[in-house]
Amino acid sequence: MPNLTDCIEDYLKKLLALSTERYIEIQRRELASKFACVPSQINYVLERRFSLERGYLVESKRGGNGCIRIYRINPGQAQSWQKVIGSFSGRGFDPARVRQLLKRMYEDKIISMREARLLEAVIRDRIYDSHGMSIDQVRKLQYRLLSEALEELLKVGY
C-alpha cells in the first residue's frame, strides 16, 4: 500500500501530465486538505520528490493567495542548469568566469545570443558602482540576480 507521500507525488504528476501548460499551479492549503494532512507534509513532498535533480522546478508564492507552481523540465537539462547555478555560489563569484561560461552555453546552444547578452548585463560592475556597495555585496547581488534569471530561463525553455 502506498504511503501518503507517494499518493501526493502521484497526484501532482498526474496533474502535470494533464496540464496544457508547462506547469501546474496549486495551493498548499487546498492540497493538504484534499489529502487530510498538514501543509508541512506537502512541503516535504515538494522538497524531496520535485527537486531539480528529478526534473522539476518548484516556485512558491507567499501571501494570502499563496500558491505553488511546479514546472516539469528535461532531467538532463535540469542537471546541467543545476551545475551552472551551483558553480556561481559562494565567495568565488567571478564575472569573468561567468562570461566564459555564458559564451560556452551560447556555443552549445543552451541559451541564445540575446539571453547571453541579457545575463551579461546583470554582471556588469559599472551598473553597481554608484550605489555605494562593497564588492562583496555587489558579488552577492550579482549571484542572486544571475541565478534567478537562469531559473526563469529554465522554466520557459523546457
Image (spheres, rainbow, N blue to C red):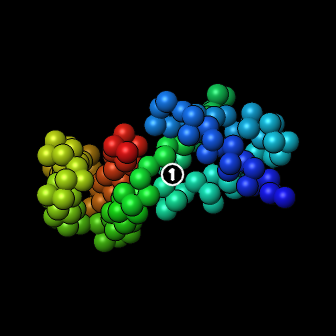
Quarter occupied by the C terminus:
top left
Q: Position of residue 66 (x, y in %)?
A: 63, 33
Tell me, yes or no, if residue 137 can be seen here.
Answer: no
Q: What residue lies at 36% left-to-right and 57% top-to-bottom?
A: 77
Q: Nearest the camera: 103 or 132?
A: 103
Horizontal side of residue 89 vs 31, given as left or right: left
Q: Position of residue 155 (x, y in %)?
A: 40, 43
Query: Residue 115: image x %, image y %?
Result: 21, 44
Q: Is residue 75 visible?
A: yes
Q: Horizontal placement of 40 versus 108: left or right? A: right
Q: Residue at x 44, y 49 (%)?
A: 73
Q: Residues within 10 Å of mark 1 (few under 14, many from 20)?
A: many
Give left or right: position of 70 versus 100.
right
Q: Nearer the viewer, residue 41 or 8?
A: 8
Residue 115 shown left or right of residue 68 in the figure: left
Q: Quadrant of the N terminus?
A: bottom right
Q: Which residue is mark 1?
A: 56
